[in-house]
Image: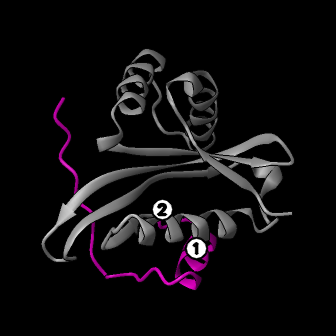
Amino acid sequence: MSPTIRQAGPADLEPIQSIIKEFYDLFGYPYEQERHRRMLTEFLANPALGSIWMVYHESALVGYLALTNGYSFEFGGHYALVDEFFIREAYRSLGLGRAVLTEIQQKARQSGLQALHLQTESYNPRAKQLYESLGFRDLNRSILSWEID
């Protein structure tokens, strides 16, 4: 059975925040509940920033995918970044990740995006293998970040 995805809206703040916290806790990312609540509230209220897709399997919320919007001269215009993608551990190896990304790729084409980017942790070769099997390419670049406070 393939997953169902639907775009989250402001009314989905609580379940989205809960599953994001689960993702951050699993991977040891820093999570500040009030800060994330403020960011999610702003993000869900402003579609120009991107979208969050809720992933369901047999009516259970099992994951989410966050897309943020950007613009790139190199890639010919508008693109989206898969900023976060999470499937609960109990639902991995069912083909849900592949099905979700395939549907997101179709939505990207339909919306006129020029590229879809994502990043993965270097310690997660299984995820990288999935992404490459769906046509994502490793451009052999490093992502460098400078955080402002």
Q: Main secondary structure of the magenta part?
A: loop
- Tell me the element at label 1: helix
Q: Which residue is mark 2?
A: 121
- Name which quarter of the figure residue 110 lies in: bottom left
Query: Is residue 133 a member of the stretch shown in magenta?
Result: yes
Mark count: 2
Kind of residue at disc 2: Glu
Mark 2 and mark 1: span between their CA atoms? 8 Å
Mark 2 is surrounded, within 10 Å at the Cα level, by few (under 14), some (14 to 19) or many (20 or more) other residues, namely few
Q: For this rendering, which residue is in front, 142 or 70?
A: 70
Relative to 115, say whether 135 is above or below. Answer: below
Q: Residue furthest top?
A: 34
State how the image is colored: one colour
- Give the magenta-colored segment's residue range: 122-149
Q: Which residue is mark 1?
A: 125
Residue 29 shown left or right of residue 102 in the figure: left
Q: Position of residue 29 (x, y in %)?
A: 48, 39
- For the C terminus, which image quadrant? top left
- Name which quarter of the figure residue 77 lies in: bottom left
Query: Is residue 129 a member of the stretch shown in magenta?
Result: yes
Q: Residue at x 76, y 51 (%)?
A: 89
